[in-house]
Amino acid sequence: MFSLPTKITIARIIFIPFVLIFWAVPIVEPILWGISLGQLISAILFVILTITDFVDGYIARKYNMITEFGKFLDPIADKVLVFSAYFLLIQDGSMIYIPALIMLTREFIVASLRMIAASKGTVIAADMFGKLKTVSQFISLFVYLFGIQNISPAMNVVALVLLWISVLLTVLSGVNYVKNSWSVLAEEN
């Protein structure tokens, strides 16, 4: 049976469609910083699911419940959550698509390397750059999902800076992941 952290990760994946559904359903006209009640519920659910990412990792480390499957599944859950949110924001015009495209490209490269490593019986876990990338993406998405960029022109600049910081960390973590996976995969050949 699955460990508690893995169950939390699976629950996160199961609840991601609700982020999409609530965002798409215009429950009422905009109520806060240009977002509707449905979008607010979606944003709150996004935050809750983001917190579960930290909770499952904490439990896994604290209670020595780290599993190979958990190390494989957790980053996938993160990516599905993050890119679902990017999709919503790009689709409704709240966010430009270039940063998301850069980040998506990185994720395809890393996912390909993960699959190659997995086929060789190796799991390459996320490192500190990967964790910083994830945190920066969550923060940036929090700002956009809650419509904080709509408060003022200054907050729009802050939102853009946070977005591009997460792009930078995404690229750096991708380069680092390629370097780390290359050395691990080369050792096995």
Image: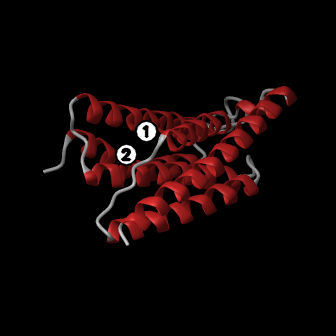
Q: Which residue is mark 2?
A: 12
Label 2 environment density (alpha carbons within 10 Å; few <14, some 14–19, many ≥20): many
Q: Which mark is residue 187?
A: none
Q: Position of residue 66 (x, y in %)?
A: 25, 42
Q: Residue at x 65, y 37 (%)?
A: 140
Mark nearer the N terminus (1 vs 2): 2
Q: In this rendering, would 65 be left or right of 70?
A: left
Corner quadrant of residue 158: top right
Question: Can you say which quadrant of the picture contains the C terminus?
Answer: bottom left
As drawn, 117 above or below 81: below
Tag 1–tag 2 contact (CB < 8 Å): yes
On screen, residue 98 versus residue 47, left or right, reads right
Q: Amino acid at mark 1?
A: Leu
Q: Nearer the viewer, residue 13 or 77?
A: 77
Q: Which residue is mark 1?
A: 49
Name above or below for residue 141 compared with residue 59. Answer: below
Q: What residue sits 21% from the left and 39% below the top?
A: 65
Q: Which residue type carries mark 2?
A: Arg
At a point 67% along the width and 38% down the height, the residue shown is: 144
- Residue 182 appears in view: yes
In the picture shown, does residue 189 fall above or below 76? below
Res 21 visible: no
Separation (CA) of disc 1 from disc 2: 6 Å
